[in-house]
Amino acid sequence: MTQQEVEVRNYPGIHAHPAGLFVKRASQFEAEIEVSKGDMWVNGKSIMGVLMLAAETGSRLVIRANGPDEKEAVASLVELVDSKFGEAS
Amino acid sequence: MKARASEKVKGTSAKKRASAKASPSGKTVPKKPVAEKAVAENPVAEKASVEKAVDEEAVDRRARGEEAVGAKAKPKAGAEPKAGGTDAPVKSRRRVGAPKELVRRGVGVSPGLASGLALVVRPEILAPDDRVISEDEVESEVERFLYAVRRSRDEIAALRECLLGEVDDPGVRVLEAHLLILEDKSLLQGVRESIENERRSAAGALFEVLSRYIQTLEQASTEYFRGRSADLRDVQTRLLRHLNGGRRERTSIPEGAIVVAADVSPSEAAAFDPERIGGIVVDHGGATSHAAILARARGIPAVVGLRDLSRKVETGDLLLVDGGSGQVIVDPTPETRSVFLGKMTKAVRVTQRLVATAAEPAVTEDGTTVSVCANIETRAELPTLERLGCDGIGLFRTEYFFLERNELPHEEEQYESYLHVVSALAPRPVTLRVLDVGGDKFAAFFGLTRSENPFLGVRGIRFLLDHPEILRTQVRAVLRAAVHGNVRLLLPMISSVEEMREVNRIVDEEQVRLRKQGLDVPPVPRGAMVETPAAVLLLDLLAAEADFFSIGSNDLIQYTLAVDRGNENVAHLYDPYHPAILRALRDIVVAADRADRPVTCCGEMSGDLYGVSILLGLGCLHLSVSPAQLPRIKDLVRRSRLTDLARMMERALEMPTSREVKAWVRRCVDQIVGGDEG
């Protein structure tokens, strides 16, 4: 299992559109992916799950993956969050 | 007119009786609102007959909730109706021992006075039937749910298709997120289980499940992020709509209620029925927001920019609304109310005088005839026009025809609708403007969130030239309708000669095609909306391609002054008296005159006393206004002297600041025309 913490930097946070980008990116990987904010863990491939984190700017997420491509998955998702979702939100 | 007036009186008393026994469903609530709406400068308020307005007692009774008002209408989720009375004793329930009224001032955007009970509209207006289903129904309800999901997905995908040409369009991004939500396994599974295990109906289950998500999200969020559940609500609403047979659910609005909302989307505003709504009071938005424009068009008194008022008011509170001054009073004291009702009574008298002369032509005191046409959105407005009289339709907006369907209408449907208006008005001209989506309208039409800078994006003719099949369909429908009357074709947001040429080519082709099919299509004049500084500067060149011009003063002011309408932070910079605007208007009229092309002004300016005076003074003798304003504008024209107004404008054009222009124009006009109330 691979996991890494990342801070949400886009404003105002992970609402529908960034959540969609996250889920799409996550779904490209075979590994199981989970995300948490605080003690709430959700399925990283479900937009409803990611939305429910209500991850606002400044909140910290932990992304963890389990599977053959887990390292790439975590790196890729951390990069996405870190890049403020390509500033597209 | 007389016969009608007496009908009205009869209708009024019959209504009183009917009110007393309105059914719980609210269906038999009388047709006309009680005297609570007196649209001072807005003659359509004939609907509020004098007799009723004078009958303060009736108003009082009504205000105390003794007549069937909103309290009896079926509540929708979030509308929280309070049973029974809403008089002072009740309101003191909230503000115990403090019978103090709350006075707020916003921006008055649709003149008129209204007194009525508040209906606070929250965004979630769809309430599902939440019945328990039998075992036999489980399968069909699941099937129904899945069908609604498929329909919603198709719908969103189709909308997305329309937008895919846009580079990185925020609308596309939102739609893609919505598609993902509709494909989310945990969501679909959750609803399915709720139907199977809890025996909820499809609508009940999906409402329940999505509401749970929404609640979770809102509880977890701070103030700002909370608004982000809007996407889930949007999806929820769409799904419920499909379960309801695909029709947009309309909020049931108690007779004469004052609608109070944080925000009103253009499509919601489009659905506002002046027969039912006494007034509109909105937290956000500016004078030219769509809600404001629609309220004005329908003759519904409205105030916007009230910040958080919708959170201070509860359904059933008594409200006094002055759509002119922008004042809103919640829970007024008896003294305040009696002063207000006195004002309403007087306003109705003025209104009656205006309506009585509405059908006569508008000739200035010095003998020039000014054509006063109407701006309409749907054919439903025709009866009002018949009553008020107009010289034609100066602007038939076709967006709402598209909006109401939530999909692109077929040529036949469009043709039928245009034909109806065209033949009703013949031989008077009907100016049909082709679909003008974009800016704020774009967002509503496609159910999208606003893009960063929609007004500088794909809108008006740009959208249509990107989607020529939509334009061609509409042009064919317009050309076919032209066979039966006097039709002009108007093109929105023209900013180059090429655009006009391209449209001309398309119209020519369609015309040839229809003629080949044996249809005797007459030549249809094509006109350009003058809304951008580019169009003003190019007017002499555009005149070679366009047969007429139409000034869209709202957008022209917005684009010329670089002020986003509806943005409350800059709304005060939106200024028809700005010297740049006066010059633009002068240049338009002069250039069009030189090229012998008629110019109509169909924007907000032509619906305002001072705006009309400016336009007439500059030589723009064709006005097009909302139906509700027809009588008042005609009255103004009749009291005007063109020579005086022309002299006034000569001087105004020399003034360097809008403050000077404004003071000067107001002073002159008040002298020349003698004020608005007559």
Image: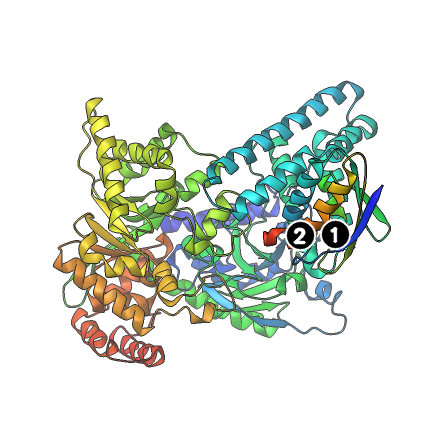
Quarter of the C terminus of chain B within the rendering: bottom left
Is A49 on the left-hand or right-hand side of B393? right
Reply above or below: B424 against B617. above
Circle 1 is placed at which residue position?
A54
Q: Which residue corresponds to the image point at 44% horizontal and 52% vertical from the top-left?
A: B439
Is B576 on the left-hand or right-hand side of B586? right
Q: x%, y% of residue A84?
A: 65, 54
Residue B155 appearing in the image: yes
Q: Quadrant of residue B93?
A: bottom right
Q: Chain of mark 1?
A: A
| Disc 2 residue type (three-letter) | Arg
| Nearer-the-camera pick, A62 or B536 | A62
Q: Which residue corresponds to the image point at 48% horizontal and 43% vertical from the top-left?
A: B445
Q: x%, y% of residue B662?
A: 34, 77
Query: At numbered mark 1, what does the secondary structure look like: helix, strand or loop?
Result: loop
Q: Quadrant of residue B559?
A: bottom left
Q: Chain of mark 2?
A: B
| Nearer-the-camera pick, B123 or A39 | A39
Circle 2 is placed at which residue position?
B228
Q: Are marks 1 and 2 on the same chain?
A: no
Q: Residues within 10 Å of mark 2 (few under 14, many from 20)?
A: many
Residue B80 appearing in the image: no
Q: x%, y% of residue B582?
A: 28, 70
Q: Are marks 1 and 2 in contact (CB under 8 Å)?
A: yes
Q: x%, y% of residue B673?
A: 26, 72
